[in-house]
Amino acid sequence: MTVGEFKELLKEEMAEAERQFAEAKVAYAADVEQQRPDLPAEDRSVGDMTVGELRALIREILEEERRRDYYIDEEGSLVFFSEEAYADYLDKQEGKLPSEVNAYFFDEQGWRCSYSDWEPTPEKARELDEARRQIAEGKVHRLEDVIKELGLEIGDV
């Protein structure tokens, strides 16, 4: 069975389960209506929800959580919990360098980080491009050769 076939089978099974659930819900709702009419939406049981309503609720919760990808610290800076969220925010700040944006993120070790404004000079950009080309071609220097050329001892490294 291919992944595509499995997805289709799963969709069919979910549709059938949703249909059966809707039928059971109608019967259950009639019983609940007799016992507790006019319940506010927040007090409804999850079991009373359709699959579609449950999906919508999950989406709503996820959207609320995504809005919490950052907070404002006591100095007024935007603090992001991930580098990805920070980078996305910087991308939306057109024409501004990272130092002009009052924001930072915490890395995996808990360090406060922000991007640098540094842009390589044309000469340094050419050097970096040449180094990348050499690496792509497999022209790399062995560590032992570099240590020897620099006149270092192994203990110095």
Image (cartoon, helix red, strand yellow):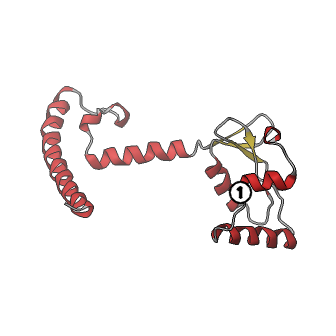
Q: Position of residue 34 (x, y in %)?
A: 16, 30
Left or right: where 130 falls relative to 13: right
Residue neighbourhood size for the residue with mark 1, other residues' Cα within 10 Å, grouped as few (<14), some (14–19), many (≥20): few
Residue in the picture at 63% in, 41% down: 81
**Looking at the figure, which quarter contains the C terminus?**
top right
Vertical order, 9 against 29 (above or below): below
Q: Nearer the viewer, residue 26 or 91?
A: 91
Residue type beneath disc 1: Arg
Residue in the picture at 74% in, 39% down: 112
User: Of helix, strand and loop, which one carries label 1?
Assistant: loop
The answer to which image quadrant residue 116 occupies is bottom right
**Looking at the figure, which quarter contains the N terminus?**
bottom left
Vertical order, 142 against 43 (above or below): below
Left or right: where 109 falls relative to 11: right
Q: Which residue is mark 1?
A: 142
Vertical order, 98 against 26 (above or below): below
Q: Nearer the viewer, residue 21 or 95?
A: 95
Q: Position of residue 144 (x, y in %)?
A: 74, 52
Q: Position of residue 108 (x, y in %)?
A: 64, 39
Left or right: where 9 falls relative to 151: left
